[in-house]
Image (cartoon, grey):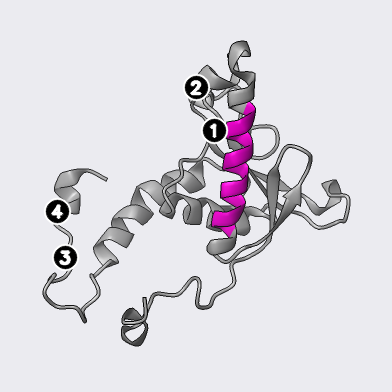
Amino acid sequence: MPEERSSDLNLGDPEDGFQPPDLRPLRTLAEREELADARARLADGLGHSLPAGDPNAPLARDVAAALTEAGFTLHNCAPHHPQYQLGGVCLLPIPSSHSSDGQGGIAVSWTTHNLLAMDWERGRERQGTQDAMNRALAGVLKALGYQVRPFGTGGASLVTEPRRRGPLTTPRNRASRGRR
Protein backbone atom coordinates (compact mmCIF):
# COMPACT_ATOMS: atom_id res chain seq x y z
CA MET A 1 0.00 0.00 0.00
CA PRO A 2 1.38 3.45 -0.81
CA GLU A 3 2.85 5.19 2.24
CA GLU A 4 0.84 8.37 1.77
CA ARG A 5 -2.38 6.31 2.01
CA SER A 6 -1.29 4.32 5.06
CA SER A 7 -0.39 7.52 6.94
CA ASP A 8 -4.05 8.57 6.78
CA LEU A 9 -5.15 5.57 8.83
CA ASN A 10 -6.14 6.12 12.44
CA LEU A 11 -4.08 3.54 14.27
CA GLY A 12 -5.21 4.68 17.70
CA ASP A 13 -3.49 6.56 20.46
CA PRO A 14 -0.37 4.68 21.66
CA GLU A 15 -1.06 5.94 25.19
CA ASP A 16 -4.55 4.46 25.18
CA GLY A 17 -4.12 0.75 25.78
CA PHE A 18 -7.84 0.02 25.53
CA GLN A 19 -8.65 1.28 22.04
CA PRO A 20 -7.86 -1.03 19.17
CA PRO A 21 -6.96 0.70 15.91
CA ASP A 22 -9.75 1.44 13.49
CA LEU A 23 -8.96 -1.01 10.68
CA ARG A 24 -11.95 -0.12 8.51
CA PRO A 25 -10.02 2.26 6.21
CA LEU A 26 -7.20 -0.27 5.84
CA ARG A 27 -9.67 -3.11 5.20
CA THR A 28 -11.48 -1.02 2.57
CA LEU A 29 -8.22 -0.15 0.83
CA ALA A 30 -6.97 -3.75 0.97
CA GLU A 31 -10.29 -5.10 -0.35
CA ARG A 32 -10.04 -2.69 -3.27
CA GLU A 33 -6.37 -3.34 -4.05
CA GLU A 34 -4.34 -6.27 -2.67
CA LEU A 35 -7.16 -8.69 -1.86
CA ALA A 36 -8.98 -7.96 -5.10
CA ASP A 37 -5.75 -8.58 -7.04
CA ALA A 38 -5.17 -11.89 -5.20
CA ARG A 39 -8.70 -13.07 -5.97
CA ALA A 40 -8.35 -12.01 -9.61
CA ARG A 41 -5.22 -14.15 -10.00
CA LEU A 42 -7.04 -17.39 -9.27
CA ALA A 43 -6.90 -19.83 -12.15
CA ASP A 44 -7.98 -23.35 -12.99
CA GLY A 45 -5.57 -26.17 -13.82
CA LEU A 46 -5.16 -24.90 -17.39
CA GLY A 47 -4.25 -21.36 -16.37
CA HIS A 48 -7.63 -19.84 -17.27
CA SER A 49 -9.39 -17.50 -14.85
CA LEU A 50 -11.31 -19.45 -12.26
CA PRO A 51 -15.01 -19.29 -13.20
CA ALA A 52 -17.23 -17.71 -10.55
CA GLY A 53 -19.50 -20.77 -10.75
CA ASP A 54 -16.71 -23.24 -9.90
CA PRO A 55 -17.70 -25.10 -6.71
CA ASN A 56 -14.25 -24.38 -5.24
CA ALA A 57 -14.28 -20.65 -6.13
CA PRO A 58 -15.55 -19.35 -2.75
CA LEU A 59 -12.95 -21.38 -0.85
CA ALA A 60 -10.21 -20.38 -3.29
CA ARG A 61 -11.08 -16.68 -2.91
CA ASP A 62 -11.07 -16.98 0.87
CA VAL A 63 -7.69 -18.79 0.95
CA ALA A 64 -6.21 -16.24 -1.48
CA ALA A 65 -7.36 -13.33 0.68
CA ALA A 66 -6.21 -14.95 3.94
CA LEU A 67 -2.72 -15.73 2.62
CA THR A 68 -2.42 -12.22 1.20
CA GLU A 69 -3.35 -10.80 4.61
CA ALA A 70 -0.67 -13.05 6.11
CA GLY A 71 1.88 -11.40 3.81
CA PHE A 72 2.30 -13.96 1.05
CA THR A 73 2.33 -13.15 -2.65
CA LEU A 74 0.27 -15.36 -4.92
CA HIS A 75 2.08 -17.04 -7.77
CA ASN A 76 0.75 -16.73 -11.29
CA CYS A 77 0.66 -20.50 -11.83
CA ALA A 78 -0.05 -20.47 -15.56
CA PRO A 79 3.27 -20.96 -17.41
CA HIS A 80 2.18 -18.55 -20.15
CA HIS A 81 1.61 -15.68 -17.67
CA PRO A 82 4.26 -12.92 -17.87
CA GLN A 83 4.86 -13.01 -14.09
CA TYR A 84 5.07 -16.80 -13.86
CA GLN A 85 8.82 -16.68 -13.18
CA LEU A 86 8.41 -14.72 -9.90
CA GLY A 87 7.24 -17.59 -7.72
CA GLY A 88 5.08 -17.38 -4.58
CA VAL A 89 2.08 -19.32 -3.31
CA CYS A 90 0.32 -21.39 -5.95
CA LEU A 91 -3.39 -22.05 -5.38
CA LEU A 92 -5.05 -24.65 -7.54
CA PRO A 93 -8.68 -25.76 -7.18
CA ILE A 94 -8.93 -29.56 -7.17
CA PRO A 95 -12.34 -30.95 -8.15
CA SER A 96 -13.59 -33.81 -6.00
CA SER A 97 -13.52 -36.03 -9.09
CA HIS A 98 -9.72 -35.58 -9.32
CA SER A 99 -8.95 -36.59 -5.74
CA SER A 100 -8.35 -40.20 -4.75
CA ASP A 101 -10.70 -39.92 -1.76
CA GLY A 102 -13.35 -37.92 -3.66
CA GLN A 103 -12.77 -34.82 -1.55
CA GLY A 104 -11.79 -31.73 -3.50
CA GLY A 105 -10.40 -28.51 -2.22
CA ILE A 106 -7.64 -26.01 -2.87
CA ALA A 107 -4.09 -27.29 -3.37
CA VAL A 108 -1.59 -24.86 -1.86
CA SER A 109 2.12 -25.06 -2.61
CA TRP A 110 5.20 -22.87 -2.80
CA THR A 111 6.90 -22.08 -6.08
CA THR A 112 10.40 -20.62 -6.13
CA HIS A 113 11.49 -17.88 -8.49
CA ASN A 114 12.76 -19.22 -11.83
CA LEU A 115 16.27 -17.98 -10.97
CA LEU A 116 16.41 -20.70 -8.33
CA ALA A 117 14.05 -23.22 -9.93
CA MET A 118 15.95 -23.42 -13.22
CA ASP A 119 19.51 -23.27 -11.87
CA TRP A 120 20.78 -26.84 -12.19
CA GLU A 121 23.68 -26.17 -9.86
CA ARG A 122 21.33 -25.16 -7.04
CA GLY A 123 18.97 -28.14 -7.07
CA ARG A 124 19.43 -28.90 -3.36
CA GLU A 125 18.76 -25.27 -2.44
CA ARG A 126 15.61 -25.26 -4.54
CA GLN A 127 14.35 -28.51 -3.05
CA GLY A 128 15.18 -27.43 0.50
CA THR A 129 13.44 -24.11 -0.01
CA GLN A 130 10.43 -25.81 -1.56
CA ASP A 131 10.13 -28.27 1.32
CA ALA A 132 10.57 -25.63 4.03
CA MET A 133 8.07 -23.25 2.47
CA ASN A 134 5.46 -25.97 1.91
CA ARG A 135 5.73 -26.96 5.59
CA ALA A 136 5.49 -23.31 6.61
CA LEU A 137 2.43 -22.77 4.40
CA ALA A 138 0.70 -25.75 6.00
CA GLY A 139 1.40 -24.27 9.43
CA VAL A 140 0.15 -20.82 8.42
CA LEU A 141 -3.03 -22.29 6.92
CA LYS A 142 -3.69 -24.19 10.15
CA ALA A 143 -3.02 -21.03 12.20
CA LEU A 144 -5.55 -19.21 10.01
CA GLY A 145 -8.15 -21.85 10.91
CA TYR A 146 -8.26 -24.02 7.79
CA GLN A 147 -8.56 -27.80 7.65
CA VAL A 148 -5.38 -28.92 5.88
CA ARG A 149 -4.02 -32.28 4.82
CA PRO A 150 -1.04 -33.36 2.70
CA PHE A 151 -1.66 -33.45 -1.03
CA GLY A 152 0.38 -35.28 -3.64
CA THR A 153 4.06 -36.16 -3.35
CA GLY A 154 5.63 -32.70 -3.66
CA GLY A 155 4.75 -31.36 -0.22
CA ALA A 156 1.61 -29.43 -1.17
CA SER A 157 -1.35 -29.10 1.17
CA LEU A 158 -5.03 -29.46 0.40
CA VAL A 159 -7.43 -27.06 2.09
CA THR A 160 -10.67 -28.99 2.28
CA GLU A 161 -12.99 -26.78 4.31
CA PRO A 162 -13.61 -23.10 5.02
CA ARG A 163 -11.94 -21.52 8.01
CA ARG A 164 -13.06 -22.40 11.48
CA ARG A 165 -14.14 -19.27 13.29
CA GLY A 166 -12.97 -19.23 16.86
CA PRO A 167 -10.13 -18.19 19.14
CA LEU A 168 -7.48 -18.56 16.44
CA THR A 169 -9.27 -16.35 13.92
CA THR A 170 -11.11 -13.74 15.99
CA PRO A 171 -9.72 -10.42 17.19
CA ARG A 172 -8.47 -10.35 20.74
CA ASN A 173 -10.75 -8.65 23.19
CA ARG A 174 -9.81 -6.38 26.09
CA ALA A 175 -9.89 -9.19 28.64
CA SER A 176 -7.44 -11.31 26.65
CA ARG A 177 -4.92 -8.49 26.08
CA GLY A 178 -3.45 -8.70 29.54
CA ARG A 179 -2.74 -12.43 29.20
CA ARG A 180 0.04 -12.49 26.64
Residue 102 on image: x %, y %? 86, 56
Circle 4: residue type: Ser
Viewer-nearest residue: 5 or 67? 67
* x, y percent for residue 149: 73, 56
Give the labeled residue for mark 2.
Answer: 82
Residue under numbered circle 4: 7
> Which stretch appears magenta?
127-141
Q: Secondary structure at mark 1?
A: loop
Q: Quadrant of residue 155?
A: top right
Residue 140 part of the magenta-drawn span:
yes
In x, y percent, where is residue 65?
A: 48, 54
Left or right: residue 137 compared with residue 83: right
- Name which of mark 3 and mark 2 comes first in the sequence: 3
Of label 4 and label 1, which has the lower sequence position?
Answer: 4
Q: Are marks 1 and 2 in contact (CB under 8 Å)?
A: yes
Q: Amino acid at mark 2?
A: Pro
> Which secondary structure is most common in the magenta stretch?
helix
The residue beneath circle 3 is: 10
Write the residue at 60% across / 12% down: 121
